[in-house]
Amino acid sequence: MSSNFTTKLSLRSLRLQATGACRPLTAAQRRRFFFNSFSRSPKPAEHADWSPATHGPFRPTKAQEQLQEQLRQPQEQEHLVHDASNIGQLDGHPAKSIAISIDGDPKVFDAVFLRDSCTCPRCMDPDSKNKLFQTCDIPEDLEGSCKTVVDEEKGLSVELEWKTDVKGYGPDHRTRHSVDWLRRAFNTEVGIRSSVRHDDRVFWDKNKIEKNNKWLDYDAYMSQDETLFDALTHLNRYGLLFIRNVPESEESVVSLASRIGTLKDTFYGRTWDVRSKPKAENIAYTPDYLGLHMDLLYTSNPPHLQFLHSLRSRTPGGESFFSDSFAAAHQLQRQSPSHFRTLCTFPVTYHYHHPNFHYHFTRPVIDLFPYPKYSEPTNLAIRRINWSPPFQAPFEARIGSSNSTALRSFVAASHAYEKLLSAEENLHEYRLNEGECVIFDNRRVLHARRAFDATKGERWLKGAYVDDDVFFSKLRVLQEKFEGSWVADGVVRHAVR
Ligand SMILES: [Zn+2]
């Protein structure tokens, strides 16, 4: 919270912050600092009486010691910022690694990172934000030196000068990074390395979803960004959302989906109709029972959001039901780790094989985030679930060997998983009325439909899809707008200049 408001603070506050940022270091911190600050080897003359026991890897120079002394004096610290003295590169000599004091601790950055992320108008086009040089143009032996400045736009910043800069950049080229930006860059790396993912998903069963289910009004969703943010946040947490008072029009589902972004076009069309018809090419277009499944698992990137708007609901039956496949996978993992492991590895092929379209894709039921730190996957390690029995193709691996039990293990594991998915206490059942639309995460929340009697009336749903990239892009835009931070790659990042 605090870092994104730093940008609005007065210069005086920035100086005060800088004071805080430069508090004296303990002896151990100092040793770490000097060790990390210089990858160039010390000149023998500078370090004649250096001892690793008392001075760390090598002894600081006189200039470094003087600056350390200054860091101990509070009044001098403010002076540091005024006079644009060095924060990290204490003797101002160019080096391959540069230590910058952030919140009182020296954080070490590779000079290549600081150079590569330069946002000056010669390095990044101010309008397109495109990079105007290539990372591969940075000399491998790049060195930089830095000093503190207060930038008009960025606030408290470091300014870097380059020795052996990218070809074509003269000695006048300077790179400026705000301390807020550097703090975020450092924290992001720590967050990514920790393998602990920020995860908003709330696993649910029947009780939980019925307590926390969300209904929003079409007009509010369409006109207010706060409501849209509420909608997307809820979808991210629970994977299921309902909209009421949707206008009776075939275009309404387009409006609902476009509010988030571009619709995903597939061979079913930009929008598609779910109603029964003779000799249907897809079981969805019959009045038959359709079991729990996900759409389009035979494609490399199946749709993320699915919208179903009820235009006609005049047949007996045809109730929809939903199940949280992540919650069931979590239950399975606790119940039988060996079944869970089987579903993480056994390859299942999906296909759509018709005269004009032939899609084919193989994936395991449970797809995990790479988790180097833990040998056993945790609930948060579940990245995707792939479950769509009606669209399965014949198995293509581990099908024949007389001594292989892989397929038998898969049957047992998938049976145990299916029991959890379709357990009464895990299902949310609802019969969509005309003028209502359900939005759900097709990569997480399984959907199904009871059979209906097509001779007794009309049942017509209008559907559309939105891709994951489009959904998360809009969610991040709204997170940044309303919360001043957003999540990417499982790490929270604060908005900074
Ligand atoms: Zn630049």
Image (cartoon, grey):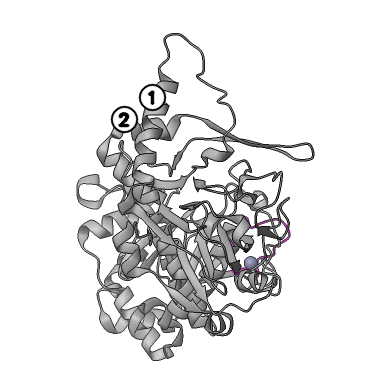
Q: Is residue 327 left or right of residue 251?
A: left
- Quadrant of residue 19 in the image? bottom left
Q: Do the residues under discs 1 and 2 have CB atoms within 8 angstroms?
A: yes
Q: Furthest-top residue in view?
A: 402
Q: Residue at x 71, y 70 (%)?
A: 128
**SS state under label 2:** helix
Q: Residues within 10 Å of mark 2 (few under 14, many from 20)?
A: some
Magenta highlight on residue 224: no
Is most of the magenta stretch helix, strand or loop?
Answer: loop
**SS state under label 1:** helix
Q: Residues within 10 Å of mark 1 (few under 14, many from 20)?
A: some
- Quadrant of residue 119 in the image? bottom right
Magenta highlight on residue 168: yes
Q: Which residue is mark 2?
A: 338
Q: Is residue 67 left or right of residue 177?
A: left
Residue 497 in sight from this viewpoint: no
- Quadrant of residue 298 in the image? top right
Q: Residue at x 20, y 46 (%)?
A: 53
Q: Is residue 351 above or below residue 96?
A: above
Write the start and end of the magenta stretch as one range. Answer: 161-174
Q: Nearer the viewer, residue 195 or 94?
A: 195
Residue type at mark 2 is: Ser
Q: Which residue is mark 1?
A: 409
Q: Furthest-right residue in view?
A: 356
